[in-house]
C-alpha cells in the first residue's frame, strides 16, 4: 500500500487496517517459522505497510 493511498483513508479505516495487517503479519511470520515461505519478501512488505499506517496514525494524533 502506497503512502498516498494511506493518506486518503479515514482515521477509523486506518485503525481497522492496522489491526488486520498486524494479525496477517503475525500469522505469516508463524507460517514462515514452521515452513519457509515461497516468497519471504512478503514479510518485509507487510511489516513496512504496518509501519506506514502506524506513522500516519501518529502524525494525525499530533496535529
Image (cartoon, grey):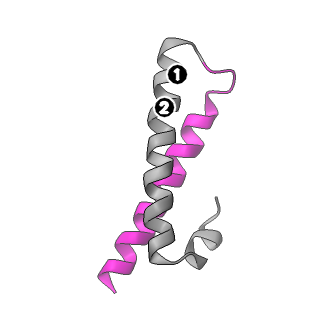
Q: Residue at x 57, y 69 (%)?
A: 6
User: Which residue corresponds to mark 1?
Assistant: 31
SS for dot 1? helix
* Left or right for 51, reference 43: left
Q: Residue furthest top?
A: 35
Q: Tell me whether circle 1 and circle 2 mark residues in contact (CB < 8 Å).
A: yes
Crowd class of label 2 (few under 14; some 14 to 19; many from 20; radius 10 Å): few
Residue 33 point in image, percent of width and height: 47, 17
Quadrant showing the C terminus: bottom left
Residue 42 point in image, percent of width and height: 62, 36
**Numbered marks: total:** 2
Crowd class of label 1 (few under 14; some 14 to 19; many from 20; radius 10 Å): few
Magenta span has 59?
yes
User: Which residue corresponds to mark 2?
Assistant: 27
User: Along the line of sight, which residue is nearer the eye, 46 or 12?
Assistant: 12
The relative height of residue 47 versus residue 26 in the rendered view (above or below) is: below
Q: Residue at x 51, y 40 (%)?
A: 24
Residue 36 point in image, percent of width and height: 58, 15
* Left or right for 54, reference 41: left
Magenta-tinted stretch: 37-63
The relative height of residue 49 versus residue 15 in the rendered view (above or below) is: above
Identify the mark at residue 11; answer none if there is no mark. Answer: none
Amino acid at each position: 500500500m502506497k503512502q498516498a493511498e494511506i493518506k486518503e483513508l479515514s482515521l477509523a479505516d486506518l485503525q481497522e487496517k492496522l489491526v488486520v495487517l498486524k494479525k496477517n503479519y503475525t500469522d505469516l511470520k508463524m507460517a514462515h517459522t514452521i515452513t519457509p515461505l515461497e516468497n519471504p519478501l512478503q514479510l518485509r512488505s507487510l511489516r513496512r505497510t504496518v509501519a506506514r499506517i502506524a506513522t500516519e496514525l501518529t502524525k494525525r494524533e499530533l496535529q
